[in-house]
DNA sequence: CACCAATCGCAACTGTTGTAGCTTTAATGT
DNA sequence: ACATTAAAGCTACAACAGTTGCGATTGGTG
C-alpha cells in the first residue's frame, strides 16, 4: 500500500488539518481571499510544509475536490421522472444555496475557471455526479415514461445547466419555479426526442450502456 | 455634463489607453495573469493613476464590460425559429471559442465570479443580449411557429445555458452538435408549453411586452 | 534498540503589489 | 494670454506572498 504507509502518523495529521483548514478558509474568505499562508496559519502547519506538499492555492483546492468526490448523493426515486428530475435539479440548487456548504461549492467552480488542475478535478467530480443522476432517466426509460435511445447524461446536463447559468454567469436569483422549469424543459426535450444518443441506445455511462436493455 | 467635462483632454486619452491595455492584457495573459501594474506598463500610464481611477483588476474589467455593452449583435433572421435559435447559440459559442475575443469574454465571466461590481455589469450586459436575442422567439410567435404566452427570455436562457455549462462549469469540449442540441432542446420545451410566462403573455422585455400583440 | 529515510518546523531573504505625500502637467474660463 | 484647478506623474515605502537552506522530529526497519 502506497498511501497507507503511515496511516495515523504525523503526515496524516498534517494532511487532515490542512484539508480542513482549506475548506474553512474557502468558506470564510472565498476563493479570491484564500491564501496558502492563511491555510497554514489556520491549520497550525508551517507554511513551508504546505507549499511543499500542495504547491499552491490551486493544489489545495484540487486536493479538497478529490476528497469531495467520495461522498454519495441522495438521488430521488419517486416513481415519476418529472419529480425525480426536479429533485435532482433542486439538489444542485440547494447545494450552492446552502449557507454552510454553498460558499465552498461555489469556490470550486471559481477555482476551476482559473486553474487547469482544478478544472480537471471538477470535471471528474461532475462526471461522477452526472453518472449518478442519470439513473433517474434510465429508470424512466425502463418504466416506458421516456423513449429509448436517450442520452441520459445530456438530459441531466440540460436540466441543471439553467441553474448554473443563473448562479454563475448571469448572477440572477434562482427561484423554486426556475428549478422546476429547468427540469421540465429538459424532460420535454427528452420526450421530443431531441436528446438522443448517437448510437440510438440509451446512454448512461460506458459501463451502464452495456448493461442496459433497450425496451422501445 | 459630468463625464464630458473634458471630452478630448488628457484624462480621456488616459482612459482610452488604459481600456485598450486592459483588453490586450486580458487577451494575452488571461484573467489570472492580469495585473494592474501590467496594464499600467502597457498603457504608458503611471500605475498610481490606474490605482486611483480603477481601484483594482476587477474595476478595470468592469469598466471594459460597460464599454462592450455598446456593440450590437448580428441576430439571425432566417424565417425559421429552429435555425434562428441555433444561430443565436452558435453566436454565443463562437464568441468564446474565437481566439481573439474568446479569452476576453471568458475573463468577463471569471471576473464576475469574484467581484460584485463586475457581476452587476455582466448581468446587465447579458440582460441586454437576452433582450436582443428574444426577438427570435417573438417573431416565431407572430409566425405562429410557437404558441403565444411564451417567456422569450427564458427560452434564450435555456438555449444558451448548456453551452455555458460545458464551457465554464464542467470544462467539457463543445461540439457543433452540442450547440444544435441545446437550441433544439429549448425549442422543444417552448413548443411543449413549459416555458410560459406567468401572465400568459409572450414576454420579451418590459418595453416589448407592451408593444407585442399576442396572436394565439 | 539503534539506525535511516522522510517529513516537518524555523528564520531569513526576495520580489511584487498596493499606498502615501508631494510635485508637475494640462485643460478650462475669463 | 493667464489664472485656476482637477488630474496625472514621481519617489519612497509598507505589507505580504512565496522561496531556500538547514536543523529537528517522526516513524518504519533490521
Image (spheres, coloured by chain):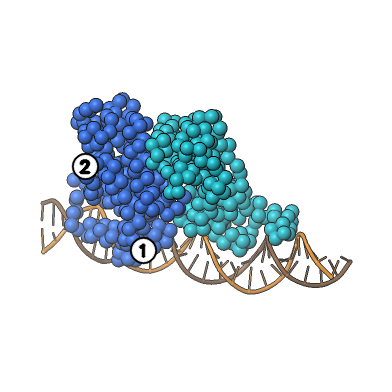
Chain colours: A cyan, B blue, C brown, D orange
Left or right of B134? Residue D28 is right
**Which corner quadrant holds the N terminus of chain A?**
bottom right
Q: In which quarter of the image is residue D12?
A: bottom left
Q: Which chain carries label 2?
A: B
User: Callout 1 environment at 10 Å: few (<14), some (14 to 19), or many (20+)?
Assistant: some
Residue at left offset 30%, top offset 46%: B86
**Would residue A95 be visible to someone looking at this image?**
no
As rendered, which of B9 and D21 lies closer to the eye? D21
**Residue at the extreme top of the image, as rendered:** B199
Give the label on residue B28, or none. 1
Q: Which chain carries label 1?
A: B
As rendered, which of C25 and B204 lies closer to the eye? B204
Percent across and percent down for residue C15 are 47, 69
Left or right of B109? Residue A215 is right
Give the structural element (helix, strand or loop) at label 1.
Answer: helix
From the image, tell me which residue sits under label 2: B79
Cα–Cα gap, marks 2 and 1: 39 Å
Percent across and percent down for residue B202 are 27, 30
Residue at left offset 47%, top offset 32%: A145
Give the structural element (helix, strand or loop) at label 2.
Answer: loop
Q: Which of marks 2 and 1 is in front?
A: 2
Percent across and percent down for residue A202 are 49, 43
**Would residue B99 be visible to someone looking at this image?**
yes
As rendered, which of C21 and B143 lies closer to the eye? B143
User: Callout 2 environment at 10 Å: few (<14), some (14 to 19), or many (20+)?
Assistant: few
Left or right of A141? Residue B212 is left
Amino acid at each position: 500500500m502506497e498511501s497507507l504507509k503511515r496511516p495515523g502518523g504525523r503526515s496524516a495529521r498534517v494532511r487532515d488539518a490542512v484539508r480542513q483548514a482549506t475548506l474553512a478558509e474557502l468558506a470564510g474568505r472565498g476563493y479570491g481571499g484564500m491564501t496558502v499562508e492563511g491555510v497554514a496559519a489556520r491549520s497550525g502547519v508551517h507554511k513551508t510544509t504546505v507549499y511543499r506538499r500542495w504547491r499552491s492555492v490551486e493544489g489545495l483546492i484540487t486536493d479538497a475536490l478529490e476528497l469531495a468526490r467520495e461522498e454519495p448523493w441522495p438521488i430521488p426515486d419517486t416513481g415519476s421522472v418529472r419529480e425525480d428530475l426536479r429533485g435532482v435539479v433542486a439538489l444542485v440548487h440547494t447545494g450552492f444555496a446552502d449557507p454552510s456548504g454553498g460558499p465552498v461549492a461555489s469556490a470550486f467552480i471559481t477555482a476551476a475557471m482559473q486553474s487547469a488542475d482544478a478544472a480537471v478535478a471538477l470535471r471528474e467530480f461532475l462526471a461522477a455526479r452526472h453518472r449518478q443522476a442519470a439513473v433517474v432517466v434510465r429508470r424512466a426509460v425502463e418504466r416506458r415514461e421516456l423513449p429509448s435511445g436517450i442520452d441520459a447524461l445530456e438530459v441531466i446536463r440540460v436540466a441543471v445547466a439553467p441553474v448554473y447559468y443563473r448562479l454563475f454567469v448571469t448572477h440572477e436569483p434562482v427561484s423554486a419555479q426556475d428549478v422546476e422549469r429547468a427540469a421540465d424543459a429538459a424532460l420535454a426535450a427528452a420526450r421530443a426526442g431531441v436528446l438522443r444518443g448517437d448510437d440510438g441506445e440509451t446512454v448512461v455511462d460506458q459501463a451502464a450502456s452495456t448493461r442496459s436493455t433497450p425496451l422501445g
